[in-house]
């Protein structure tokens, strides 16, 4: 059976990553496969959006290095909202360096990402040492705090350089070897990027009006990404954060992504 035909409940049993298991279960019980990309530059604006949209999302995605007034207090508040509304935190850092450097970037510096982000994203460009490097930073995370990574195997940017061979090798890094318990899923644009049902397909570039932006972003509708492209979670940024009513927009995207998933598994 194709992975896209299986329910999130069933797939949680197949996941090798503890965070992926948790996220599959969260999606099923909360009935949402919406990831909100909170790409705004003031801490209070992120918290406001997170509070309004929190009940309708499974994941809140950050780019922590765009926040102009970052503080540890901001992280404490964000974690409180994640707990109150039951969503996980994904820092879209797209790590891409040698193991030693990503270990430092993940655990140290101003942001200490490994202390608070349940999940991060990483490029597979450096090869599987990216997983070992990230894991090496987790010594300072308290026992029981589970962490995971989404590996990129495709991008939504027009003209990106990823080809079939790169995709295939990214899939191998995600599914073979000793560190696959750390891989929660794959960031990609199509259902043929990987086959293993225990991984979560995260797909950015989602907007109700299929369109492009001025800087190479390419959008597809919620229905298309879930039913035709295999997305398990749809990532929506400007479709929600630039709406007049962000809460209403989050509800609309949640409903459309979730209905598309229900129809996909009912087929
Ligand atoms: P948008 O406002 O919905 O276009 O935001 C999309 C978000 O997803 C943004 O934070 C990007 O950095 C992120 N993204 C993407 O758009 N396309 C990709 O292929 C990857 C990440 Br990987």
Image: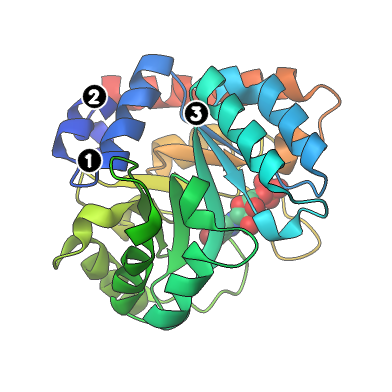
> Is residue 97 something one can see in this rendering?
yes
In terms of secondary structure, where does tag 1 sit?
Answer: helix
Give the answer, above or below, for where 219 lies relative to 208: below
The label on residue 9 is 2
Q: Which residue is mark 3?
A: 87
29 left or right of 203 in image: left
Residue 18: x %, y % from top left = 25, 41
Q: Which residue is mark 1?
A: 3
Circle 3: is it few (<14), some (14-19), or many (20+) Cα within 10 Å?
many
Q: CA distance from mark 2 to mark 1?
A: 12 Å
Q: CA distance from mark 1 to mark 3?
A: 23 Å
Circle 1: is it few (<14), some (14-19), or many (20+) Cα within 10 Å?
many
21 left or right of 86 in image: left
Residue 82: x %, y % from top left = 55, 28
Dividing the image into 4 quarters, which one contains the C terminus? top left
> Is residue 167 something one can see in this rendering?
no
Residue 5: x %, y % from top left = 24, 32
Residue closest to the far right: 244
Q: Residue at x 63, y 18 (%)?
A: 251
In the image, 170 versus 180, the foreground residue is 180
Q: CA distance from mark 2 to mark 3?
A: 17 Å
Viewer-nearest of labels 1 and 3? 3
């Amino acid at each position: 059976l194709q992975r896209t035909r299986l329910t999130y409940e069933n797939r949680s049993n197949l996941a090798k990553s503890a965070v992926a298991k948790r996220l599959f279960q969260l999606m099923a019980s909360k009935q949402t496969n919406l990831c909100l990309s909170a790409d705004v530059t003031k801490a209070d604006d992120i918290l406001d959006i997170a509070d309004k949209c929190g009940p309708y999302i499974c994941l809140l995605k950050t780019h922590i290095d765009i926040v102009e007034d970052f503080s540890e207090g901001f992280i404490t508040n964000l974690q409180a909202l994640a707990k109150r509304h039951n969503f996980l935190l994904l820092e879209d850092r797209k790590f891409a360096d040698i193991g030693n450097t990503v270990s430092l970037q993940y655990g140290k510096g101003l942001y200490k990402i490994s202390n608070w982000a349940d999940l991060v994203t990483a490029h597979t460009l450096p090869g599987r040492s990216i997983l070992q490097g990230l894991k090496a930073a987790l010594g300072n995370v308290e026992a029981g705090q589970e962490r995971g990574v989404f590996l990129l195997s495709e991008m939504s940017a027009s003209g990106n350089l990823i080809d079939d061979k790169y995709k295939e090798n990214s899939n191998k890094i995600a599914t073979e070897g000793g560190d696959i318990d750390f891989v929660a899923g794959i960031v990609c644009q199509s259902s043929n990027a990987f086959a293993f049902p225990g991984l979560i397909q995260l797909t950015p570039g989602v907007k109700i009006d299929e369109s492009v932006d001025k800087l190479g972003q390419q959008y597809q509708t919620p229905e298309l990404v879930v039913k035709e492209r295999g997305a398990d979670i749809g990532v929506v940024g400007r479709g929600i954060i630039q709406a007049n009513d962000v809460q209403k927009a989050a509800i609309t995207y949640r409903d459309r992504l979730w209905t598309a998933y229900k129809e996909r598994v009912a087929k």
